[in-house]
Image (tube, rainbow, N blue to C red):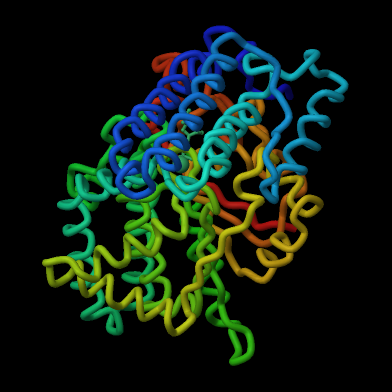
Amino acid sequence: PVSLSGRFKGSFAYFTIKDRLPQILTRVIDTLHRHKNEFFEEHGEVRGVEAEKRAISFLSKLRNELQTDKPVTPLEDELPDAALWNQYLDYQRNLPNGNGEPSWFQSPWLYVECYMYRRIHAALAQNPPIDNFDVFKEGKAQNFFESQEAVIALCTYFQELLKNIKDLDEKQLQEELFKLLQVSLWGNKCDLSFSAGEDSSQKSSPLQSLENMVPYILVNDMEKVWSLLVNAKKNRTERSNVRVDIILDNAGFELVSDLVLADFLLSSKLADEVYFHGKSIPWYVSDTTKHDFNWTIKQLGSANHMWMSRCGINWEGNLKKGVWVFHDHMFWTLPHDFSSMSEVASDLYAELQKSNLLLFKGDLNYRKLTGDRKWEYSVPFHQALNKFHPAPLCSLRTLKSDTQVGLKPGQGEQIQASESEWMVSGKYGVVQFDAGL
Ligand code: F6P
Ligand code: MG
């Protein structure tokens, strides 16, 4: 099937490129303006303010190129991934069914959207001394603070659970796993790229309404995740640890929900180690970088709330002990879909092959898993993965882009009939599993 693209007028891709991406760029420019004094104080007029001006002019040019559907141009910076991006542009140019010269509205949405974030990165990275400034950092921190009550509720629930986790029977453990999987699933609603930077924090208690939301989980493979983990635990030997990898998405409340899930996996002995995969550059507004990851754990550890700080301190301990590991790899911020990982990033593919279970968080990861195409809703997930099978995997995703596979025949059409926005409202979700080979 064809790629989602801005050339389909009226589609969500079209609307995103036309309205939301320029809005995000405008916010980035505003953010730089607002920090002018800080740049001045830290680096002086000549270095600091000049760098800010250059970055802003680069970004205004970018916004203009986007809005007037100009061709996508090769990257001119010398960052380590530039060559791969430029090769990918050539690949887009030579696609047999391509639409001529790649451009913002004519090319695949996934490609141009990723490209925009890479150019935002270049605007800063090329302009020392402000080259390490994360333009999205404030928004991510704000999202975290505005979710404070939900974070407290979740940490409190979890610390209570830990008190008697040893006495839980299998059925109870399964129930708790399902709960925390759902908290992590719905945590994916808190995404600042979807809201174009507007507040998107978790306000209500994350555990309260889970049951009412079950009908909105269109594919629910939680049982399969459970059996995989229980079997892995039974077959585990001293030499073969059970390893779960979480391919992270957004910082803020979603990240906290992922960390709680990861802690549960260790505390329940369903897993022995958890690897987290984050982004190596600021990405899709709220995606988690190494800085966000460490910052979040520090915030919790030093919080003025007993259960929050208990969580943070334990998690720092997990990192020190090496039972939690944070990784970032350049591949996660390339435009490629995951079916080309084995070729483009064979080291990362080999790393994922060591895992017993890969949990892919969020909408962008889902788009990259399935190639961001106009699939028929009932095409099997396995088929859409297009040979991407490093290990058994499960996607936890709320629907925020118009692609979906693996539904029962007629299921998608039925929802579509009464709710035309179902794929892009964030109201529905999937817990979608693929066993691999
Ligand atoms: O258009 C919605 C959007 O901004 C998409 O660009 C992207 O797929 C998604 O949201 C990002 O969502 P998530 O943070 O869940 O990956
Ligand atoms: Mg995201």
Q: Quadrant of the C terminus?
A: bottom right
Q: Residue at x 43, y 39 (%)?
A: 46
Q: Nearer the viewer, residue 365 or 112?
A: 112
Determine whether 248 is above or below 91 in the image: below
Quadrant where the image shows the N terminus? top right
In this view, the residue farthest toward the front is: 46
Residue 342, quarter of picture: bottom right
Considering depth in this image, is 287 or 158 the residue closer to the camera?
A: 287
Q: Looking at the picture, how far across and down is residue 368, in whole percent?
A: 63, 40
Residue drawn where x is 52% and y is 8% of the image: 10
- Residue 186 appears in the figure: yes
Q: Answer with the quarter of the image where residue 403 lies.
A: top right
Can residue 430 be seen in the rendering of this structure?
A: no
Whether 111 is drawn above or below 240: the answer is above
Query: Is residue 282 placed above or below 417 in the rendered structure?
Result: below
Q: Picture coordinates of residue 168 (x, y %)?
A: 30, 78
